[in-house]
Amino acid sequence: QLAGDDAEDRALAYLLRQGLQLRTRNFRCKGGEIDLIMNERETLVFIEVRKRSSMRYGGAAASVTPAKQARLIRAAHLYLSRYRAMPPCRFDVVAFEQENMSWLKNAFATA
């Protein structure tokens, strides 16, 4: 858990430096959890942070499986239910393998 919290802290600091603004951290609901919800200009960005110590099994980005994506999408729908008008949205992944970080914008889309 501590390694995940550290990765989330590092991802948040990086994204803030890139000009994104934090809306919510660790949004939890019955369907799942979203690590970071941020704004990039008018776009609402749902961000999954993943950390893996090795590239075994495809690494951090590959660990966002279709089942994980479905849970993120369900949680995003619940978060968005508070809005009258749907803002533009996207799903990003910030992946850490050892000390290397990758920011994958539009990592996946809703069906």
Image: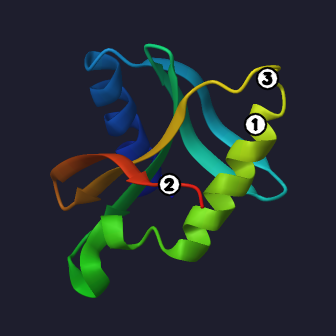
Give the image quarter of residue 23. top right
Relative to 32, is 7 above or below? above
Question: SS at mark 2?
Answer: loop
Q: Circle 3 sits on which residue?
A: 83
Q: Residue at x 51, y 58 (%)?
A: 1
Disc 3 residue crowd, few under 14, some 14–19, many 20+, Cα 10 Å: few
Secondary element type, mark 1: helix
Which residue extends farthest left? Answer: 100
Residue 7: where, in percent of width, then height? Answer: 36, 47
Above or below 36: residue 54: below
Q: Quadrant of the C terminus?
A: bottom right
- In terms of secondary structure, where does tag 3 sit? loop
Identified by mark 1, the residue type is Tyr
Residue 27 in picture, x, y percent from top left: 69, 40
| Above or below, comparing residue 8 to residue 54 in the picture | above
- Is 69 situated left or right of 32 in this image? left
Mark number, residue 56: none
Amino acid tagged 2: Ala
Nearer the observer, disc 2 or disc 1?
2
In the picture, measured across the screen, residue 35 lies left or right of residue 19, that is right
Q: Are marks 2 and 3 in contact (CB under 8 Å)?
A: no
Q: Residue at x 75, y 33 (%)?
A: 80
* Circle 1 residue: 79
The reply to whether callout 1 and callout 3 are in contact (CB within 8 Å) is no
Taking depth in this image into account, of 45 and 17 the one nearest to the observer is: 45
Horizontal relation, residue 99 to residue 23: left or right:
left
How many neighbours does mark 1 have within 10 angstroms: few (below 14), some (14-19), or many (20 or more)? some
Q: Which residue is mark 2?
A: 109
Label 1 to label 3: alpha-carbon separation: 8 Å
Across and down, in percent, residue 28 comes to 74, 46
